[in-house]
Image (tube, helix red, strand yellow):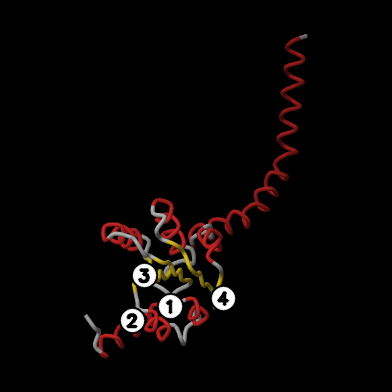
Amino acid sequence: MALKLEDKRKIVAEVNDVASKAYSVVAAEYNGLSVAQMTALRVAARKENVYLRVVRNTLARRAVVDTEFACLSEALTGPLILAFSVEDPGSAARVVKDFAKDNDKLAVKAVAIGGELLPADALDKLAKMPTYDQSISMLMSVMKAPIEKFVRTLAEPHAKLVRTVVAIRDQKEAA
């Protein structure tokens, strides 16, 4: 069934809106996947707050023109599904990577982040990026470490004195 011009404009506007807010995008070829497999992929994407859409390549090219994913235009060939990371940069890559482990028919064609087109093998690097909460946790541990070391250094002379007194007491009791 052919799309009407209004429907095409709606699709382009929707994808453009998501692309303008997204952190990264993964384009994967889905040729050969069954409907049940595609449904499972969409469910997994929905759980991770990843926008997943099958869009005609001409419409996708128009949708990403004024976004940082304009670099993706030349990679849009063949039957592709676009996965946009809405919350954190690695979420779409994690969803696609996890799904591709069990389904070899899903082949990653391109990855884009920060206005830069990356090859398909960059999916692993993007998938390993920490989430927002993990990043904050890592930052807090780095900020907390010097203070902890300072407190341990201040407490060590007193602890050493107590250990020495206890050793002397034990030595006198044994004699």
Mark sitting earlier along the chain (4/1): 1
C-alpha separation, residue under disc 3 versus residue under disc 2: 11 Å
Between the residue at mark 1 and the residue at mark 3, the CA separation in whole angstroms equals 11 Å
Graded by Cα atoms within 10 Å as few (under 14), some (14 to 19) or many (20 or more), the crowding at tag 1 reads some
Residue that mark 2 sits on: 14
Q: Secondary structure at mark 1?
A: helix
> Do tag 1 and tag 3 residues touch (Cβ < 8 Å)?
no
* Secondary structure type for disc 3: strand
Q: Which residue is mark 4?
A: 116
The local secondary structure at tag 2 comes to helix
Residue 165 horizontal side relative to residue 10, left or right? right
Q: Quadrant of the C terminus?
A: top right
Mark 3, Cα crowd under 10 Å, few <14 / some 14-19 / many 20+, is: some
Q: What is the distance, in whole Å, between disc 3 and disc 4 at their CAs?
A: 19 Å
Residue at numbered disc 1: 21
Task: Kindly report which numbered mark, 1 or 3, lies closer to the viewer in this rendering.
Answer: 3
> Mark 2 is on which residue type?
Glu
Position in image of residue 38 (x %, y %): 31, 61
Q: Residue furthest left?
A: 1
Q: Earlier in the sequence, mark 1 or mark 3?
A: 1
Question: In this view of the protein, which residue sits in the foreground, 111 or 75?
Answer: 75
